[in-house]
Image (cartoon, rainbow, N blue to C red):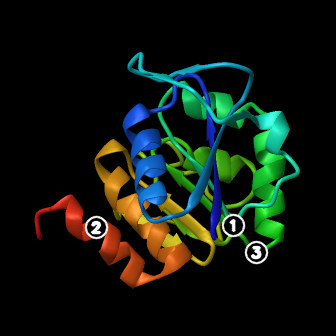
Amino acid sequence: MARVLVPLANGCEELEAVTIIDLLRRAGIEVVTAGLGEGPVTASRGVVLIPDRPLDDVLNDEFDMIVLPGGQPGADHLDADPRIHALLQRMAELNKYTAAICAAPKVLLNAGVLDGHKATAYPGVIDGRLAATSVLLTDAVVCDGKVVTSRGPGTAMDFALTLIEQLLGADKRQEVEKPLLRPKG
């Protein structure tokens, strides 16, 4: 079974966090939510989220993917935490997935994970800051190797479904997506 870590910081974007957690769990993926500290996390719109565990308790656990929800100041809190940078770097070194949405791709950038990759993010978050070997796109979701990024709250469902597809394949994505009754584009 695939195992995914979703760190939760105060001020995270709840629509992104909950969509990621919900859809990945619908796919049968083991999702572990971890707060940067002890206790509940208050998201950007005041929704209170209860992480499964504190981050310190899972630092040495094995995961197939780490997914960072965006939102402000949540992405800033993730970016200021050296444990998150170390986790991202370790995941990249192990050729495991690193993923971020909205403002959180800046955490991947500052951890050195975006070097040499195509990426997307909320407008203005990483503009002009990528290495010369990287490319910033405006697509809703960008997959480049084991790095997956997305634009913002409106792309959260596409992002989560793409994460399912990356981990478990297109058939599992379709199985999860069909009962959601998403409009066809």
Asked whether the beta carbons under mark 3 and mark 2 sit within 8 Å of each other, the answer is: no
Q: Is residue 8 left or right of residue 80?
A: left
Mark number displayed over residue 64: 1
Asked whether the beta carbons under mark 1 and mark 2 sit within 8 Å of each other, the answer is: no
Residue to which mark 2 is pinned:
177
Q: Is residue 83 left or right of residue 49?
A: right
Residue sitting at x 39%, y 65%: 161
Q: Quadrant of the N terminus?
A: bottom right
Mark 3 or 1, closer to the camera: 1
Q: Helix or strand or loop: what does disc 1 sit on? A: loop
Of the image marks 3 and 1, the number of the one nearer the N terminus = 1
Mark number displayed over residue 95: 3
Q: Quadrant of residue 27?
A: bottom left
- Count neighbours of disc 1 (C-alpha within 10 A) and say few if under 14, some if 14 to 19, many if 20 or more: some
Residue 67 seen? yes
Of the image marks 3 and 2, the number of the one nearer the N terminus = 3
Q: Helix or strand or loop: what does disc 2 sit on? A: helix
Name the outermost residue toward the right. Answer: 60
Amino acid marked by disc 3:
Asn
Amino acid marked by disc 2:
Glu
Q: Where residue 55 sits in the image (x, y, percent)?
A: 77, 36
